[in-house]
Image (cartoon, rainbow, N blue to C red):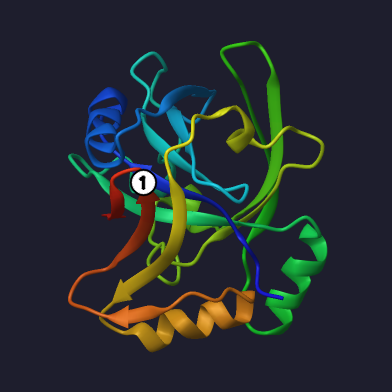
Amino acid sequence: MPLRTDHIIYIAPELEAACDRIEALLGIRPVFGGQHPGGGTHNALLALGNDAYLEVIAPDPAQPNPDRPRSFGLDKPGEFRLATWAVKAPQMATVVAAARARGYDPGEVVQGGRTRDDGLRLAWQSTKRPESISGATPPGDWLVPFLIDWGDTPHPSGAAPAGGTLVSLHAEHPNPGTVQAILRALDVDIEVREGPAIGLVAAIKTADGLVELR
C-alpha cells in the first residue's frame, strides 16, 4: 500500500508574513508550533484532515544562525512556496530497506524533537538525505518526500486548528519521469505533471470552496 501523506511544508522568509498568506487563502490562521533548536527555524501548523497537516516553517530570528544550512532551502532569500512534504513510515527500517532495494536511498534515519508552547515535548524519527547537511538539492528537487515516524508522540495534527481538508497533492517538473521513478521506488503514489517550473500543488477543501496552495 502506498505511503500516506503526513504533512506538507510551506517555506517562507518570515513566519508571521507566511501565516498572513495562509490565512488569506484558507480562512484560518496557522498556530505557532515551536522552535527547532539548533536548526535555526520555527513553525506554525494547521490540520488538514486524515491525520495530515500543513507546516509553515521559517528562519527563527531568536536563534543564532545554525552551523549547517537550514532545512528545505530556507537560506534562499524571499521564497514563499510549498517546498516539500513527508510521508508516514511507522515501520521505518522496513520502508528504508525496501526503497534502497528498489534503487533509492531515503537517507540516514535521525532523531528530531521540539517543545510545544504548552511544554509538551514532541519527538520523531525521520530520514535525512546528505544534501540536507551540505545544502545541495536532493534527487527529485525536493518533490520526493522524506519519511517520518512519530512513535508514541501525539501527532501534531491533533493540536492544530482545522484549516480544511487536503484533497490531493501533485508535483510539477520539467522532467516528470525522473521524479516519478524515485517516487515509485519509495512506494509513493502522486501524479507528477510536466511543467516549466518545479513545485508542489496541494488542493485543499475549505469552507469557501477548493483552493490551491503552491
Q: Which residue is mark 1?
A: 206
Pick whichever, 104 or 121, lies toward us. 121
Q: Which residue is painted at 47% across and 33% down in the image? A: 45
Pick whichever, 14 or 136, lies toward us. 14
Residue 120: x %, y % from top left? 69, 17
Residue 31: x %, y % from top left? 44, 23
For label 1, the SS is strand
Pick whichever, 80 or 142, lies toward us. 80
Q: Which residue is painted at 32% across and 81% down in the image? A: 193
Circle 1: residue type: Thr
Query: Is residue 88 shown above or below 96?
Result: above
Q: Which residue is painted at 24% across and 29% down in the image? A: 20
Residue 17: x %, y % from top left? 22, 27
Q: Residues within 10 Å of mark 1 (few under 14, many from 20)?
A: some
Image quarter in which the C terminus is found: bottom left
- Asked which quadrant contains residue 168, the reply is bottom left
Query: Is residue 186 shown above or below 6?
Result: below
Residue 39: x %, y % from top left? 49, 31
Query: Is residue 49 shown above or below 147?
Result: above
- Asked which quadrant contains residue 212, the reply is bottom left
